[in-house]
Amino acid sequence: MKLKISIIIFFNVALLFAQSDENKIYLLDPNGFERIGGYKKIIYMLNKKDNNPKFNHDSFKFTVPNRSGYDKLLRFNDIRKKISLDTINFTTKKKLFSEMENYEIHEYFSYLFRNGKSLFIIIKKHENYYHFPVQYNGTEKNLEILNHGF
């Protein structure tokens, strides 16, 4: 009897972990960098040229969750985690941008969050890869942010 219960518990736990991995989407942006926004938010953006002649590009905006409790903010280095690309399935920003139009990318990111999927951005820093969770905040046209090498 204990053996049957142990087997049932084992398969339930295995199923739980399998489902949680299915809900994680990884996107590699090796040259990406994070930005600090208002109210000490950590912002991440992906930019893609727009084919519409009225606009230069679209900015897909994300927030990196950095709150721990009510009033404690985490630093980006505390949020990002080292990862080996050999251990996960991922797509690249280049591949995603080549396969979809801008409105399709917006719909894709919106779909992920409406359907309980978690998106993780992977960046490369000092020959290592790091991933961190993001929450999609929508798309803006012609938003300009400069990288000052911070």
Image (cartoon, rainbow, N blue to C red):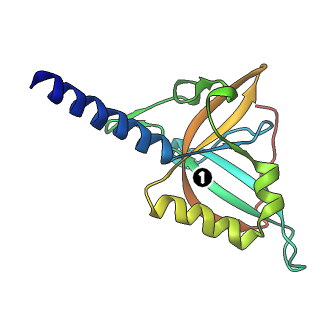
- Residue farthest toward the right in the current orientation of the protein: 53
Q: Give the x, y percent position of residue 101.
A: 78, 70
Residue at 62% x, 64% y is 108
Quarter of image, res 98: bottom right
Mark 1 highlights which residue? 62
Residue at 65% x, 67% y is 106
The front one of 136 and 145 is 136
Quarter of image, res 36: top right
Q: Looking at the image, is 137 positioned above or below residue 21?
A: below
Q: Looking at the image, is 100 positioned above or below residue 133?
A: below
Q: Give the x, y percent position of residue 40.
A: 53, 41
Quarter of image, res 96: bottom right
Label 1 Cα neighbours within 10 Å, binned few <14 / some 14-19 / many ≥20: many
Residue 51 horizontal side relative to residue 2, left or right:
right
- Residue farthest toward the left in the current orientation of the protein: 1
Residue 24 horizontal side relative to residue 126, left or right:
left
Residue 19 horizontal side relative to residue 49, left or right:
left
**Split into 4 quadrants, where in the image is the C terminus?**
top right
Q: Give the x, y percent position of residue 124.
A: 75, 29
How many numbered markers are drawn?
A: 1
**Split into 4 quadrants, where in the image is the N terminus?**
top left
Q: Give the x, y percent position of residue 37.
A: 60, 47
Residue at 16% x, 29% y is 4
What type is the residue that disc 1 sits on?
Phe
Residue 110 horizontal side relative to residue 149, left or right:
left
Task: Identify the element where label 1 is drawn.
Answer: strand
Residue at 52% x, 30% y is 79
